[in-house]
Image: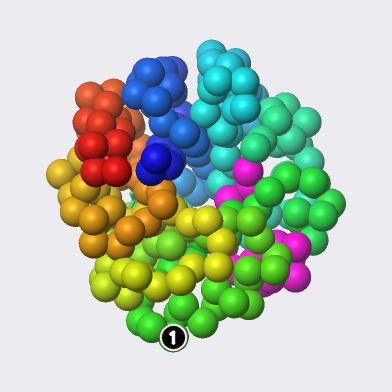
Amino acid sequence: MTLVKICGVKDAAGFDAAVAAGADLIGFVFYPPSPRAVTAAAAAELSGRAPRGGEGGPLRVGLFVDPEDALLEAVLAALPLDLIQLHGEEKPARAAGIRARFGIPVMKALGIAEPADLGLLAEYAPAVDRFLLDAKPPPGASLPGGNAAAFDWRLVAGRPIPRPWLLAGGLTPDNVAEALRHTGAPGVDVSSGVEKARGVKDPARIAAFVAAARGAG
Ligand SMILES: O=C(O)c1ccccc1NCC(=O)[C@H](O)[C@H](O)COP(=O)(O)O
C-alpha cells in the first residue's frame, strides 16, 4: 500500500484530518522561518491527540534543516519522533551521526532536477533509512522545501532507489494518482497541495489527497 505523509501540520484541525484520513506519517516542521513551523511543545500537544506510531497512529516525523544537536535534543525531550527528516545541506556523515547519536531512523530529502542528482543516492544510502525525493527550491524561494514545485517525474520513473522513498513536490489531490502511476513511488509526501492558504492545512484537501493516493495503489 502506498505510504502517505502529510507534512507541515501545525494545528488540531490539520492533525485530526490527517489521522482520520489514515495518513501513515505526519510531519512537524522545526524550522522557524517556515509558515508551517511549530514549537516542540505545540507538536507534542498535537501528537498527544492520536495513538503513537506503531500503536495504531501515524509515524511522527520531525523535519529539520541543518539542525544543531541542541535543537534535536530539545525537540526529542518534548516529543518522541519516529523519523528525523533532514531537509538542509546535511552531508552523509552528519546524517549518519544524527542517526547514531539519537537512535532514530533518518530520512534525507534530496532535490532532483537532473539525472546527476540521482548520483547522490548511493552516497547517502549507507547513512540513511529513507529518501524523500523533492523538487529543488525554485529561484527566489525562501524555503528549502514546501514550495508547491514539482520536478520532472521521468527522472525517477522506474529507477532503482536504494532505500524506501517518498515522492514529494507539487503534489495535489488532482495529480497524485498520476504521479504514482508514472513513477511507481512507494510513498508520497504533500504540504502545499493540501492547504487552503500558505501554512494552513485544509481538512477536505487532506482527505481527498489520501483517498486519491490510496485509490492509485
Ligand atoms: O514545508 C516547509 O515549510 C518546509 C520548510 C523547510 C524545509 C522543508 C519544508 N518542507 C519539506 C517537505 O517535506 C514538503 O512536504 C515537501 O517539500 C513538498 O512540499 P510541497 O511541494 O509544498 O507539497
Would residue 8 appear left or right of 105 to someone viewing this image? left
Q: Point out the residue furthest to the bottom here.
A: 116
Q: Point out the residue furthest to the top here.
A: 49
> Disc 1 on helix, strand or loop?
helix
Instruction: Work out whether residue 215 or residue 50 is closer to the camera in this orientation and state it.
Output: 215
Crowding at mark 1 (Cα within 10 Å: few <14, some 14-19, many 20+) = few
Q: Is residue 148 above or below residue 29?
A: below
Q: Position of residue 150 (x, y in %)?
A: 27, 62
Would residue 152 appear left or right of 72 to someone viewing this image? left
Q: Amino acid at mark 1?
A: Ala
Residue for point 31% across, 69% down: 157
Q: Number of labelled discs?
A: 1
* Residue 23 showing in the rendered view: yes
Q: Position of residue 21 (x, y in %)?
A: 34, 24
Q: Would you say residue 84 sits in the magenta stretch? A: yes
* Residue 35 showing in the rendered view: no
Instruction: Work out whether residue 43 or residue 99 is closer to the camera in this orientation and state it.
Output: 99
Residue for point 52% across, 28% down: 58
Would residue 36 appear left or right of 213 to someone viewing this image? right
Q: Would you say residue 6 sits in the magenta stretch? A: no
Q: Position of residue 72 (x, y in %)?
A: 73, 44
Q: Is residue 120 above or below residue 103?
A: below
- Magenta range is 83-96
Q: Position of residue 59 (x, y in %)?
A: 56, 33
Residue placed under numbered mark 1 in the picture: 116
Would residue 29 appear left or right of 11 to someone viewing this image? right
Residue for point 75% across, 63% down: 96
